[in-house]
Image: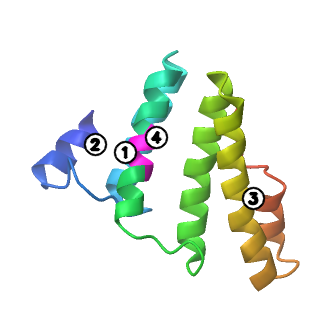
């Protein structure tokens, strides 16, 4: 709540676009994760889906920026996990596929890179 108060005072919230890695990106992710941890996975999923729409509007470049790839991968992972919890296996698989596609592209750019390999194995999935 404090983070959103600060963002509102700075006129950064609510935003039509959210840049990956920005303060608002992390605040919205924290809000969604708190909803999930509080037993409201459907609300968390709504928040993550809205975050993804706003991130997409900011035109990230995950194919060119490793930082964007990591941040977007985390969003895909969270959405997939929340869909899995909600019994939406097809949606979960769609986001897992997007994540995998992203890291395969990076693996082609950075062959045998240990960080990229770690991401390809999917070891950043939330519990």
**Which disc number belongs to residue 39?**
none
Q: Determine which residue is flagged by label 2.
A: 3
Depth check, mark 2 against mark 3: the one in front is 3
Q: Which residue is mark 1?
A: 27
Quadrant location, the N terminus:
top left
Q: Residues within 10 Å of mark 2 (few under 14, many from 20)?
A: some
Q: Residue at 45% across / 70% down in the picture?
A: 60
- The reply to whether the C-beta atoms of the residues labelled 1 and 4 are less than 8 Å apart is no
Q: Label 1 vs label 3: CA separation?
A: 25 Å
The mark that comes first in sequence, 4 or 3, is 4
Q: Which residues are magenta?
A: 48-52
Q: Residue 47 placed where, x, y %?
A: 40, 36
Up/down of 45 relative to 39, above or below: below
The residue tagged 3 is 100
Question: In this rendering, would 8 be left or right of 38?
Answer: left
Q: Are marks 1 and 2 in contact (CB under 8 Å)?
A: yes
Task: Give the SS element for disc 3.
Answer: helix
How many labels, in total? 4
- The answer for how far apart the CA atoms under marks 1 and 2 are is 6 Å
Q: Residue furthest right?
A: 112
**Mark in the foreground, 1 or 3:** 3
Image point 68% across, 66% down: which residue? 102
Q: Residue 81 lies in what quarter of the image?
A: top right
Among the two numbered marks 1 and 4 on one chain, the one whose residue lies closer to the N terminus: 1
If the image is split into quadrants, where does the C terminus sit?
Answer: top right
Of marks 1 and 4, the one in the foreground: 4
Name the residue carrying label 4: 48
């Amino acid at each position: 709540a404090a983070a959103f108060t600060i963002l509102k005072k700075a006129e950064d919230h609510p935003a039509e676009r959210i840049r990956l890695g920005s303060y608002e990106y992390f605040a919205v992710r924290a809000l969604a994760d708190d909803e999930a941890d509080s037993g409201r996975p459907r609300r968390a999923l709504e928040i993550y889906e809205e975050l993804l729409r706003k991130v997409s509007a900011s035109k990230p470049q995950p194919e060119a920026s490793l930082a964007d790839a990591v941040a977007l991968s985390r969003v895909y992972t969270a959405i997939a996990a929340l869909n899995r919890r909600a019994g939406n296996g097809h949606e979960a698989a769609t986001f897992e596929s997007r994540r995998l596609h992203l890291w395969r592209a990076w693996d082609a750019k950075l062959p045998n890179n240990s960080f990229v390999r770690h991401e390809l194995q999917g070891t950043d999935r939330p519990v």
